[in-house]
Image (cartoon, rainbow, N blue to C red):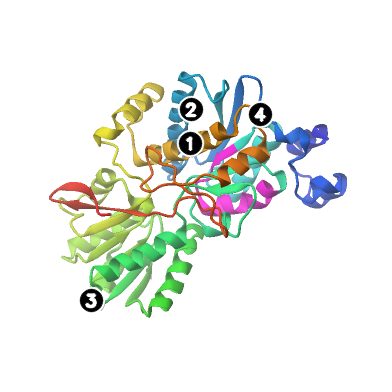
Amino acid sequence: MCFFFFNVTATTEISPLSLHDALPISLASGSALADGHQTQGISDNEIQIGAFGPFGGPVYLYGKLVMNGVAAVFDKVNEAGGVHGRKLTLVREDDNCKPEGSIAAVKKLAYSEKVFAIVGGACSNATLASVPELEKSGIPMIINSAVADAISTPVKKNIYTTQLTSSIESRAQLNYALEKGAKKIAVVRMTDAWAMARYNPLIAYAKEKGVKFIADLELQIDAPDATPQALKLKAAGADAVIFILYAKPAAVMMRDALKLGYNPEWVGQTAINDFAAFQKQVGIPGALKNFATITAIAYQPTDPEMKDWAARLQKLFPNDELSTFNLNGIGSAQVIVEALGNVGRDLTRDKFLAAMGNIKNFESDAYAGAITCDHPRSHQCNQTPGWLALRDGKITRLD
């Protein structure tokens, strides 16, 4: 049986239909957790954990840096003797933030590298595309960056997420604008799968709250100028602007609005939670005075509580400085280690997934809220958004 799976991995041209016809019913129906796969990636002294995400290009922060954070946790655990005597090994695959790359990465990790579980998934469009393959393989998957609700809701037995999902963030953004007293709220958004996964629940929640947006504008990820959008927002009199943008286009939007003397309440989300980096991108002193953003992370990289993690990361990756992206990886890896530890020495995939589902009120070193994975209708383990803003020149948690 395993021999056939190796051939499938090496021959990616084989269609899902031919795979279905060739396998026994128990596997073809999606139950790849047959006996031989329950302990795949486990030896007497090692547990292999796979990882995929973009390790280069404009969104490498959500892949490479997050995975470096995972590696830092594994290094600390291994230094202390591992999990029940087994060291943790991270096996990385670059998906280039593309659907085809994500599918290929899952296949390679599950069938060729034969890892025990996978952590990662940075880009929502790419990760969503891999869900059918993840379900078919049955390999445990812990999402730590992609935010689309559809990845983990409705419940998929082998997929959990430790990241705030898009609907949680979208509701929080609108609530924040309303709590600030905004009467004319606008949206500036990208149009890819990542953005639409946030935009659609935002529109639904706005309808529920009786809110009609004064402006709804598009801005592309690589836009060099946002003056037309800034002029429209100013003319409409928007007193709060909700961003569904990555940090780079959000910085362009704020920069060009500020050049026009226009500075409403700017409402960000987890793609924009490294304040120091974002301030540099905007490039105007005092630009973040009216800016607040959602964070899944409890700390900024320079906080004294993060000193030990900064030192460990520097040891492992000398060219890196600790970032919120690293901290995201640290939080997710600690959840994985918690579940592995709760299983004990007699580790299987089913027991690991059961342990994930039993995690309640777990406090990591990084996340803003406690992690609980036993929600009946989803495997969204992180449902506590935090808020960051500048107060008296200092980055401050608002919650």
| Residue at the spot of label 4 | 346
Say if 169 sits above or below 345 in the image.
below
Q: Earlier in the sequence, mark 4 or mark 1?
A: 1
Tell me if residue 130 is in the magenta stretch. Answer: yes
The amino acid at mark 1 is Ala
Tell me if residue 185 is in the magenta stretch. Answer: no
| Residue drawn at x 40%, y 63% as measured from the top left | 170
Q: Earlier in the sequence, mark 1 or mark 2?
A: 2
| Residue at the spot of label 2 | 74
Residue 333 has which mark? 1
The secondary element bearing badge 2 is classed as helix
In x, y percent, where is residue 396? 22, 49
The amino acid at mark 3 is Gly
**In what quadrant of the picture does the C terminus appear?**
bottom left
Q: Earlier in the sequence, mark 2 or mark 4?
A: 2
Residue 61 has which mark? none
| Residue at the spot of label 3 | 237
In x, y percent, where is residue 303? 25, 37
Q: Which residues are magenta?
A: 118-135
Query: From the viewer's perspective, is the residue at label 1 or at label 3 nearer?
Result: 1
Q: Earlier in the sequence, mark 1 or mark 3?
A: 3
Of residues 283 and 303, the one nearer the viewer is: 303
In x, y percent, where is residue 357? 57, 47
Q: Residue 332, can we see it?
A: yes
Query: From the viewer's perspective, is the residue at label 4 or at label 3 nearer?
Result: 4
Say if 11 sits above or below 87 in the image.
below
How many numbered circles are shown? 4
Separation of residues labelled 4 and 3 (CA atoms) = 62 Å
In x, y percent, where is residue 28? 81, 48
